Amino acid sequence: MRSEPVLLASGLVVEFGDVRAVNGFDLSVAAGSSVALVGRNGAGKSTTMRVLAGVLPPSAGSVRVAGVDALDDPAGVRARVGYCPDVGGLIPRATPWEHLALAARLRGLPEGWQERATELLTRFDLEPAADRITSGFSHGMGRRLSVLLAVFHRPSLLLLDEPFDGVDPLGVDVTLDIVQEARAQGAAVLVSSHLLPLAVRACDEAVVLRGGVVVGAAPASELTGAAGDDRYRALIS
Amino acid sequence: MLPPASAQTRALLGLRWQMVRTPGVKLAMVMVLLLLVLLLQAVLRTGSTIDPDAVTTAVQLAPQAFLGFAVLAVVAPLSAGGGTQVIPADQLVAFPVRSQTHFLGGLVLAPANLVWVTQLLVLAALTSYLTLDGGTTAGLVTAAAYVAFITVLGQALAWTTTGVTATRPGRQAALTALLCLIAVVVVVVRLGHGGAVLEDAPTRLVVDGIAAAGAGDWWRWGVTTAVLGIGATAGLALGGRVCAWALSRSRDNGLRAEGAGVRRRRQRTTAFLELVAVDRASVWRAPALRRGGLVLGLLPGAVAAGAKVPWESLVVLPGLVAAGAGLLFGVNLFSLDGSGAVWLSTLPHDPRVALRAKLVVLTETVLAAMLISVVAGSLRSPGAPTPTEATAIVSAALACTAATLAGCLSMSVRRPHRADLRGPRDAVAPPGALVLASVRLAVPAALVGVLLEGSSATGLVWLPVALALPVIALSGLSLRRSAAVWASPVRRARIVQHVSAG
């Protein structure tokens, strides 16, 4: 018997007044796999990610994460999701360590979270900045910390929205490693990015969003190189 | 060639007006302006309707009232780091805005302050009393010249302070100057010369100039008005330069605070206490909120102590301080999380706990500011308070705290704004929203204060409590309604979207 995918989104609709930002989005992501969500600016990628993360309630449709319905048990879904928002996502006058302590407390992580936190801070090269307030961070540092906070509790579903934006090559490598590790531990990963080469490096499959609807999907390997670029351009235009 | 500062200021004000999202808010702002005009006309007529003895007393106190306005004209822009910003500086980095535009913008928005407006009405009333026999229009011209002169001067002084305090030696020098000033004031007051100093305040010359219009001494009136007008014009030119200098200074404290790090604290035992600790840090690590909190904690109490306010009148103080504390950050509570509000909303927790944490931080700020002010104000109050006066002060403190919390939460859930609060001049909401918020908070607080002040003179110990209880109950109901808005996922998502935008 096939088990239920970690992420199962069906018929998602998000309306802002008269504007329909997401228009019947369907997607399933199995445990241990990763999917890239790509598309032009304004395609509805970040709005979709916000809905999947539980930040924004959908106007219609349903989201299930690891068998838990987001409408019935929103807190249960949040406990299983790790989300890196597309911009910011950090409390400006709190330090990375304070973010981690707050996440540990709200997620009910057992004692010993400090070791995991220190290990991740070191890997993301944020250890020296662990006690600095985040409003002084560069954009890339902020992105790295957002990814770190998303993976901190080893979520079942990892949602990374523009995780490579403004991040230096070493930071990109760490993020790619983190994605692979999460998959190896059985997590489903959804990466939204406008940087196609990096998105396809992180994922096995890519789905293309246009006007809030999935308009195409392809194995990530088919979207690499010049031919992949041409195919991608054809899909989004 | 860049357009002149006046044109840039007009453009920025126009943009700010367009950025007001809802027509209702625009209408409310116009209504406040109309109300001000009506109030101005009304106070100008009071001279002929009130008791002549009261007019005489008011005229005797006129130099002090004009001096009070001068103090406000300095303190208000000082507490705003140089003056109110038309548009936050971080949103203007891509535009070639002149330094003089910042100065002019701050001047134009100086009246966007309830205390400034109240004092203006007092000056207008006093001017009409000083010119009861005629020449009111001429007197008002002099008063207007004084207001312009002192506002420009206050703003220039505030920018000078901002520039000086950009570096550590400058901050030390400013602190030394402030301590010396306080020491001089304390010594003068303790030696019993406070009244004489106020009597001989330089503002007496302005008052005499206004009175000269009433007496037909046009030479004296002309000289006074001309000097004030020339001073205002010169101050405008000088202020622009001072502002340019202050803005060109590299601030070492902001960089140090962001770069040096903070002491790692122990993890709190519960999620609620952890949220309280993060919110508390978000308030005190914001330079603008820290400075505003200090001004709020020290100034009202110092003024009350200096004025030797009787116990009965101290009843009004908690309400005014509570409203000021609410304006510090309470009217836009969720902006403390900034873009982190998005991340917080993905953590598995009861949103009501996060709301309670913010209310706790606001409550402790309001109560601390109140306590400092009342204790400082009471140091020189004559005698001991009667049981009714003591009850009235405590009742006023509780009722005004409840009313302020209710007003703040209501505005926070219904009119959220993005607020960076990174720089020393950043405010928790746009200028127009702050004006409406100050009216929304100060009017009920003042009414409660006046009501309880009246009750304190009756000798009925139970009366202040009886008057405060309905206020507390109504505030409780309002808090419940606002909490229900926050509990709604759709409304909460909207709040998060607003405070994290950008």
Image (cartoon, coloured by chain):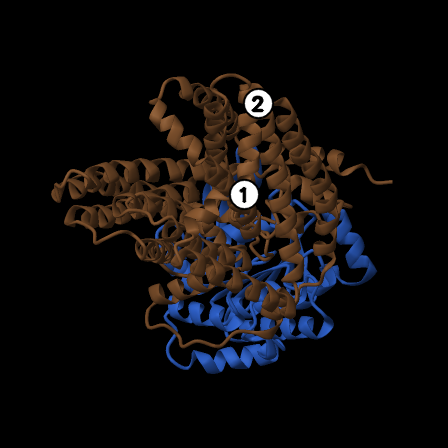
Residue type for callout 1: Ala
Mark 1 element type: helix
Closest to the observer: A186 or B317?
Answer: B317
Q: Quadrant of residue B106?
A: top right
**Left or right: where does residue B419 sit relative to residue B458?**
right
Q: Which mark is residue B70?
A: 1
Q: Looking at the image, is mark 2 or mark 1 earlier in the sequence?
A: 1
Q: Tags 2 and 1 in contact by the CB under 8 Å rule?
A: no
- A60, above or below A202, in the image: above
**Left or right: where does residue B118 sit relative to residue B229?**
left
- At x 31%, y 43%, the residue is B316
Closest to the observer: B181 or A177?
Answer: B181
Q: Is residue A69 visible?
A: yes
- At x 49%, y 31%, the residue is B123
Closest to the observer: B437 or A193?
Answer: B437
Q: Nearer the viewer, mark 2 or mark 1?
A: 2
| Image spot of residue B205 (x, y percent) | 57, 36
Q: Colour of chain B?
A: brown
**Dot 1: chain letter:** B
| Image spot of residue A16 (x, y percent) | 53, 37
**Dot 2: chain letter:** B
| Image spot of residue B148 (x, y percent) | 62, 35
Which quarter of the figure is the N terminus of chain B placed in? top right
Mark 2 element type: helix
- At x 72%, y 70%, the residue is A168
10 Å crowding of disc 1: few (<14), some (14-19), many (20+):
many
Q: How many marks?
A: 2
| Image spot of residue B462 (x, y percent) | 12, 43
Q: Which residue is mark 2?
A: B213
Q: Is residue B417 visible?
A: no
Q: Colour of chain A?
A: blue
Residue type for callout 2: Ala
